[in-house]
Amino acid sequence: MGYSWSTMVGASYGDHWRNLRRLSALEIFSTSRINSFLSMRRDEVNQLLHRLSQNTRNEFGKVVLKPNLIDLSFNIIMRMIAGRRYYGEVVDDEEEAKHVRDIIEEEKSMAGVSYPGDFLPFLSWIDYKNFKKRAFVLFKKMDRLLQGIIEEHKDGEGRHSMVGHLLSLQKSQPDSYSDVIIKGLMVLIPWSGFSTSCREFSNSKIKQTKILKHQDNNLNVTLLM
């Protein structure tokens, strides 16, 4: 999944890692690049609010925020990266969106799994539970998907996206912005952004629960007095 340890997370410290850090700081996460996607983020938030208002137009209804916020986070991240929506009721291509969602769910099921072969080498020799085979098949699916997105941008389907911007830089600096480096960033950024969003949502939920509990205790004390 890490393209032979060539991503920023897996690469050893050296010229390649410093180039990835420079690329990320200047071309992806700089203030100007983030601000250039402001209208995209506003559009996604507006679509979410519109959908929620349509569902509760005639009467009050219960809204489960977590799945809606997860879809919002993924759509914002993927639109910034590839210029496409893959979650929610309105997507650019239903078949492609379903394929992407299936791959992401499969990757989530394997991410962070403790592989027994790492602790007992003989299990790695026999490929215990076909873990390596399943990981290799998943990698091939992911690689075809990412390469397809890159080829779409190269064929002229230029979108306001991270991939389009990096490919424009590839023309003048092919070694620094190779397809492998771009695909490595496409794998890394969604999971980093999604993990951060989930962590912030969980922290805010815990904080809100503590505040409500504190207010409830204060109310009980007031009533007893």
Image (tube, rainbow, N blue to C red):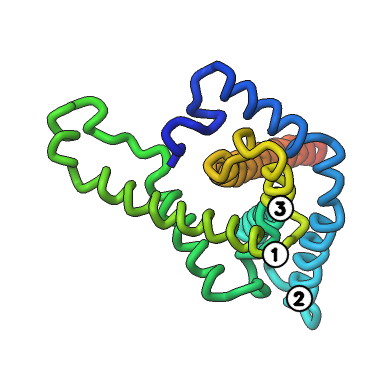
Q: Residue at x 66, y 43 (%)?
A: 197
Distance of label 2 from label 1 (alpha carbons): 41 Å
Q: Mark 1 highlights which residue?
A: 156
Can the viewer see residue 225?
A: no
Contact between labelled residues 2 and 3, with CB atoms less than 8 Å apart: no
Q: Nearer the viewer's eye, disc 2 or disc 1?
A: 1
Q: Residues within 10 Å of mark 3 (few under 14, many from 20)?
A: many
Q: Mark 3 highlights which residue?
A: 164
Q: Amino acid at mark 3?
A: Gly
Q: Mark 2 highlights which residue?
A: 56
Of 61 and 177, the residue lying toward us: 177
Rendering coords of residue 172 (x, y %)? 72, 40
Quarter of the view holding residue 191: top right
Q: Residue at x 45, y 54 (%)?
A: 142
Q: Amino acid at mark 2?
A: Thr
Q: Nearer the viewer's eye, disc 3 or disc 2?
A: 3
Q: Is residue 63 above or below residue 9?
A: below
Q: Residue at x 18, y 41 (%)?
A: 127
Rendering coords of residue 68 (x, y %)? 66, 61
Contact between labelled residues 1 and 3, with CB atoms less than 8 Å apart: no
Q: Amino acid at mark 1?
A: Gly
Quarter of the view holding residue 114: top left
Which of pointers 3 and 2 lies earlier in the amino acid sequence? 2
Which of pointers 2 and 1 lies earlier in the amino acid sequence? 2
- Label 3 sits on a secondary structure element that is helix
